[in-house]
Every structure is written in structure tokens, then in C-alpha cells.
Amino acid sequence: MAKCSVCGGPAVAFIRYQKRYLCRDHYIQFVEDKVRRAIKRYKMAGKGDRILVALSGGKDSTTLLGALSAVRDDIGFELVAVHIDLGIFDYSVKSREAARRLAQSLDVPLIEVPLKEVIGATIPELAKKSRRPACSVCGMIKRYVTNAAAVELEADAVALGHNADDLAVYNLKSFLTQDLEAISKLGPRTDSVEEAAVGRIRPLYLVYEKESFLYSFLRGLPFLHEECPFVDNRQMEVRLKEVVNQLEEERPGTKLQMVTKLALRIKDYPKPRGEIRRCRVCGLISSSEVCSFCRTTERALGKAMGPAVREYIRRKGVELGLIPRVKNTATG
Ligand code: FES
Ligand code: ZN
Ligand code: ZN
């Protein structure tokens, strides 16, 4: 049996691009070190910051919250999580259970936003009413609710669960389609826009998808293995993922090189054009007079629901003692 290159114990994984075997404990440490390094190298968070994680119950956000909770005391930041109950049948019920169990076991305060209760419709209902594919409505809703939660809870950043594989693929896709503005958003962090949008960070920037999965598995973190029933496997991303995996197979470390080089050049890519303003209805970031969340809900449900979402989160934040925010600078 292969032995851990650090302690000689039984190995559970081989890191090809480092030619090292690692045991369970050193593997967990290896992933957490990557997260700690990414946070420091790319100045994602510091002492006293409040970081918000959108916890879906799937493997990426589970690894993200697990690894962030492991390094939070070293760096001295605070964690809060938000889970959106999308109302996608059984899938959402199981996702909610996984998110609840995880947040509780890691001692992270969790705000749940049940869409049906807060805006009066689930994702399948909204998709039907707005005649749009479920995934596109869903993506927009998740971005809106997560940003609304971050603004209401005065978070310093929203942590996203994108790993190195995701970023390598998005980068490639954006390059092939010459959507260079999209590349400018794929770096380790993006800045906040006054009080309308909270900046985003990607603590799993240096972590491979496989590593993310194995980390959650080895730590026994609860996550949902099922995929959303609306997942579309014909997307270009799926093909590009195969290409990137093939390159990694032939030249171990390719994905890491892709993301670290991207981080170095990110400022050279053009920023999205167009004015950034605040939605006339809800006050959050928007590219037009009314944001797409308020517009979509107005059209599909007869009422723009942005203010209701903000109000709901504010109420929950107060109940959980997260609002008003008390800056914690005692740790770290
Ligand atoms: Fe949103 Fe699948 S998780 S449509
Ligand atoms: Zn070891
Ligand atoms: Zn709005």
C-alpha cells in the first residue's frame, strides 16, 4: 500500500502534479492550506471580516464552507451562510436538509430563504410563468438573493464555490467565444459596488474539483450527491471540461497553471461596459432602471419582489442576532 509522503501513514490519494501521496489527515490539511494560501495571496479576507457563503447543499458549497470554517480562526474572519429553498421538488427538500446539518455541525449561522414563502413562487413555477428555462431563471434568482443577503448582513464579501476546474473551463469558453469582459470577472476576487453589490471571492481558486469532492468526503461533511433535475448536460462547458481534463491527464498541473496565470493577467481584460446603477424598485445593483429580479417577478407574479426579499432577510438577520452587525476583531 502506498504511504503518505509526509508521515508514512496509509495514503488515500496521489497528487499527480506534486508526485506526492497523502494520508487522510494530510490530505485535509493540503486542501485547507490551499484555501488559506489563496485567501492570503489574493487578499480575499482579513481579520474581522464577515464572509457570506451561499450554501446550496451540493459538494462545492459544502467544501467551501467546510474549508472556510477550518481556517476562519487563523485569519480571524466570521462566517454566515444563506440557503435558498428553490422549491425544486424532492431535490430542494434534500438540499435544505444537507445545508441545515452542515451549518449546524460547523457552527455557522444560517439564513434560509424559502422562495415559495418569500416571493410566492418556486423556480419551476417562475420558469413556467416567465417562459424561460429553469436554469436561467434560477441563476438570476440565486445571484439576486445572495447579493441581497450580503448587503443586508453587511458582509464584506460573498464567497463562491468555484474551483480551479470551473474557472479553467469558464475561461476557455469565454476566450473561444471572445467574451473577454466575462474573463475579467473570473479572477480570485471582484470588488464591491458601493452599497448595491458586495464583492465576491473564490477561496477554492487553487482547489481541483476532485480535491474538493474528496475533501468533503474524507471529512464526512453532509452534502447532496444528486444533481438538479434541470441540469443541462449538452452545454459547451461539459465538452470543454473533457478537454481540460485530457490536458491535465497529459500534463499534470495544467489547471493550476491556467488559473494562476489568469489571476496574474486578470486586470488586462476589458471590464464590462455599460453603466452600473441601482434598481429603482429595490435599490440593489442593476444594469437598467429596474433590475432583472424585480422585472421578472413583476412580469410573472404581478409584483416586483426585490423589497420583499430584502425585508425577509433583514427580519431573519435580526432574529439570528446578525443585524445590527457587531464587528468581531477579537479572534485571529
Ligand atoms: Fe437551479 Fe437547477 S439548481 S435550476
Ligand atoms: Zn500523512
Ligand atoms: Zn430590483
Image (spheres, rainbow, N blue to C red):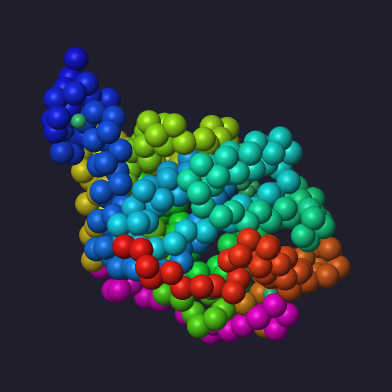
In front: 112, or 184?
Answer: 112
Write down which quadrant ligand 2 falls in: top left
**Residue visible at 82% across and 57% down in the picture:** 120
**Residue visible at 57% across and 40% down in the picture:** 101
Q: Name the dominant secondary structure of the magenta segment.
A: loop
Q: Is residue 94 magenta?
A: no
Q: Is residue 323 left or right of residue 168?
A: right
Q: Is residue 104 left or right of residue 97?
A: left
Give residue 40's position: percent from left, percent from top: 26, 63
Give residue 142's position: percent from left, percent from top: 61, 58
Q: Give the vertical position of 215 relative to 42 (above or below).
A: above
Give residue 273's position: percent from left, percent from top: 47, 80
Quarter holding the N terminus is top left
Q: Quadrant of residue 324?
A: bottom right
In front: 86, or 31?
Answer: 31
Q: Give the vertical position of 284 relative to 241 (above or below).
A: below
In front: 198, or 182?
Answer: 198
Q: Which residues are magenta?
A: 265-283
